[in-house]
Image: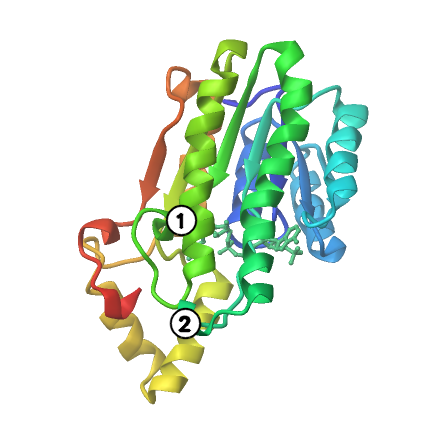
Amino acid sequence: MRLRDKVAIVTGGGSGIGKAIAVLFAAAGAKVVVASRTLAALEETVREIRATGAVALAVQTDLLVEAQVRDLVQRCVEAFGGVDVLVNNSAAMIPDEVEVADMTLEHWNKVLQVNLTGSMLCCREVLRTMMPRRSGSIVNVSSIAGVIGNPKRSPYSASKWALNGLTETLAIEAGPQNIRVNSLSPAATRTERFEAAVRARAERLGTSFDELMSKILSHYSMRRLAEPMEVAKAALFLASDDSSAITGQNLIVSCGFHMLNPTEIR
Ligand SMILES: NC(=O)c1ccc[n+]([C@@H]2O[C@H](COP(=O)([O-])OP(=O)(O)OC[C@H]3O[C@@H](n4cnc5c(N)ncnc54)[C@H](OP(=O)(O)O)[C@@H]3O)[C@@H](O)[C@H]2O)c1
């Protein structure tokens, strides 16, 4: 039980990678608080976790609203006495592809506000409870798009590069209080959202889902995508004492994509 008696907040815990992280952390002994805008999805995660005998709580939270982020951390402290682990997993996954030359400020700001400012607010609020206790671990779910450029998705890419900068900066600021801060960068992961995006792109290109997937996979040295639970295992490593001397790092979870990544399939 690598997170026995720990309390973890997982944003975006109602779907995809965040849900896998919440379920895995609960299985590792943590009391898990899941947070995002869609209460029904969060409650489904909580139901699944409670069915295993573990403890979980759903807190509806829009990261764009500062007061709701404050309330999220407050409710976690009230329910479980503190916060040991924060996973900043939520992200605005806007499907529109647009080059900078055609960018609207609205599109740009929305992505930055969720992915970067929302994550910073969550860090700020948990640090206020972690610092006096001189203990904590923060895991920021970044992306391979935060390591290499991502044409037509500049706000997403810029937000993830910035999240990595926030990670390293916070690791320096909070290190003296025994708080570790790391990020992990998945490449494409086999979530429903990713598969829907590939289906839509295949339709646009007039090709089949299978053909496009096999083209995509040819650029992953392992010829497959990571499963959400594999990304969750990397998050568990960074959240737990298994990585007790590791801080300020960005762990790439890409099935080998970061070594073979031509622009046309990003
Ligand atoms: N899947 C991939 O291929 C992949 C690759 C690289 C990196 N990632 C990263 O992995 C993380 C999870 O992505 P995913 O693929 O699992 O996608 P996902 O299922 O769409 O997860 C995104 C989550 O963010 C939450 N969210 C969005 N806006 C929010 C807001 N304003 N306030 C609070 N929560 C908000 C969503 O919940 P609500 O809509 O309920 O708010 C959702 O649960 C993201 O950080 C993403 O950048 C994913």
Is label 2 in a helix, a strand or a loop?
helix
Question: In the rendered image of this protein, does residue 198 appear above or below residue 49?
Answer: below
| Residue 142 falls in image quadrant | top left
Residue shown at 36%/53% (left/top)?
Answer: 145
Is label 1 in a helix, a strand or a loop?
loop
Query: Dots 2 and 1: beta carbons under 8 Å?
Result: no
Q: Nearer the viewer, mark 2 or mark 1?
A: 2
Question: In the rendered image of this protein, does residue 64 appear above or below residue 204?
Answer: above
Q: Is residue 42 left or right of residue 191?
A: right
Type of the residue with mark 2: Ala
- Mark 1: C-beta under 8 Å from nearest atom of ligand 1: yes
Q: Nearer the viewer, residue 35 or 150?
A: 150
Identify the residue under disc 2: 101
Type of the residue with mark 1: Ser
Residue 11 percent across, percent down from the top left: 62, 43
Residue 2 percent across, percent down from the top left: 50, 22
Name the quarter showing ligand 1.
Answer: bottom right
Q: Which mark is residue 143?
A: 1
Across the whole image, how many numbered discs are drawn on residues? 2
Residue shown at 45%/46% (left/top)?
Answer: 229
Q: Is residue 163 visible to us here?
A: yes
Outermost residue toward the bottom? 206
Q: Nearer the viewer, residue 233 or 167?
A: 167
Q: Is residue 252 left or right of residue 77?
A: left
Which badge, 2 or 1, comes first in the chain's sequence? 2
| Residue 209 falls in image quadrant | bottom left
| Residue 235 falls in image quadrant | top left
